[in-house]
Image (spheres, grey):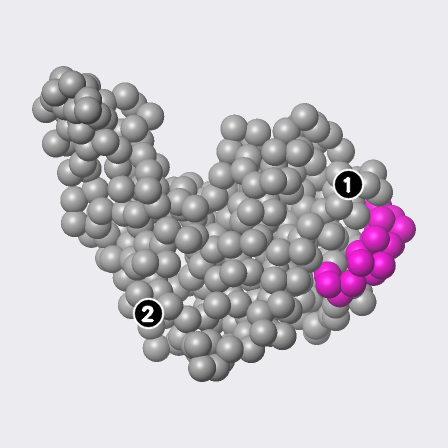
Amino acid sequence: MFPTTRIIRIAVAVSALSPAAFGFQSLASPTSFVRSAAVTRPIPTSLAMSDSERYSIPDQPARFARAKAEHNQRYLDITTVYDPSYLKGKRVAVTGANRGIGFALAKELKDQGAKVVAINRSSSPEMEALELEEVVLGVDVTDDDLCSSLPSKITGGPIDILINNAGYFYEPVEKIDSLNFKEELKMIDICALGPLRVTAALYNGGLLEPGQSKVVMITSQGGSIGWRFTQNPTGGDYGHHMSKAAANMMSVLLSQEFKEKDIPVGILHPGFNKSDMTAKYAEIWEIEGAVDASVGAKRVLHEVGKLDMSRSGKFYNCEDGLEIPW
C-alpha cells in the first residue's frame, strides 16, 4: 500500500488534470478541476492550458451560445483577425475545389492573389468562372494510378500549400440495423487514404519542398473519439466517424514523418458550414452557428496562415481556433 502522504500527492495530481486530458470537457465550469487543485499546490501552466484556454468544447449549440455571450469576435466575425496577405503569389493546391467549402477556398484564394491549382474529379461552371491558375480534372483520390500521375499533370512548379479537402459523406443515418459496409469503406478510402495518396504523390514527385511547403488536412470534429460521448450519445453514423478518425491518425503519423523534412501538417475542423453536404441539417444551422462557406473558407485560411512546425500534428477547430482532443 502507498504511504498516506503519497496517496495525497497522487490525488492532488489527478485532480489537477482537466477533463480534456481524458478527452472530455467540463461545460458548466471549465476551470473547476484546476481551481480545486490550486488550493493545495500551484498548477503548472501546461496543465492550466489544458482546459478552456486550449480546448474547444464538444457541445455545438453551447459553443455557439458561449461565443455570443462572450462577444467572441474571433468566432463571430473572422474578418476581425483574418489577414490573408500571406497568400499573395503562393501556389496553393486544393482538392475538391469545384463545390462546397472547396470552391469557397478556391475563390477566396484567387481573390487574395494566390495561384490556385484545383485537383478535382470534375469541374463546375462556378469553378470555371474563377479562371484558376491550373485545373487538373479526372482525379479520383481512391485511384492509386491516377494520384501517382498527378506530378506530371501539374506544370507550374512546386506547391507552397496543399489543402486536402476532398471528402465524402454518406447521408442515410447508420444504426446497427442499417449498416452499409461498402459505403463505410468508401468513406474511409476517400477521407483517410485519399489525402495520403495525393500528398505522397506530390511529395515523391518533388512538388512539396522541405522547409517551404505546408500540408493541410480538412477533417472534422466527427473524428474526435472523446467527443463522441457528447455528440453521439446514442452512437450511429459509423462510417463517417471512423473515416474522420482514420484521417486524423493518418495526419498525425504524416506530421511525425515530415518533422525532419520541415513540412508542417495542419489538421483542421473547418467548422459548421452551410453547404450541400450539410443541407439535411438546415433546421439547426442557426441554432448551432453554421456559416456560409465563404466565411468558413476565411476561418480555414486564418488557421493555415498560423500553421508552422509548432502546430504541426495538432487538431484545431477553425470556429474558435482552439484544439480538439483526440
Name the image quarter holding residue 42.
top left
Residue 305: % across, % down = 55, 38
Residue found at x 55% / y 60%: 243
Q: Residues within 10 Å of mark 2 (few under 14, many from 20)?
A: few
Residue found at x 83% / y 53%: 148
Residue found at x 70% / y 39%: 160
Residue 313's place in the image compared with 42, above or below, is below
Task: Identify the residue position indicated by label 2 in the image.
Answer: 234
**Residue sitting farthest toward the right:** 152
Q: Which of the two residues, 52 or 36, is positioned nearer the viewer here?
A: 36
148 inside magenta stretch: yes
287 inside magenta stretch: no
Residue found at x 49% / y 39%: 314
Name the image quarter holding residue 230.
bottom left
Residue 159: % across, % down = 75, 42
- Identified by mark 2, the residue type is Thr
Range of magenta residues? 140-156
- Identified by mark 1, the residue type is Tyr
Q: Quadrant of the N terminus?
A: top left
- Label 2 vs label 1: CA separation? 41 Å
Is there any visible trace of residue 121 in the rendered image?
yes
Residue 149's place in the image compared with 54, above or below, is below
Q: Which mark is residue 203?
A: 1
For residue 279, side relative to residue 128 (left or right): left
Residue 124: % across, % down = 70, 72
SS type, badge 2: loop
Q: Which of the two residues, 203 or 33, is positioned nearer the viewer here?
A: 33
Residue 289's place in the image compared with 111, above or below, is below
**First reached walking from the N terminus: tag 2 or tag 1:** 1
Mark closer to the observer (2, 1)? 2
Residue 97: % across, % down = 66, 61
SS type, badge 1: helix
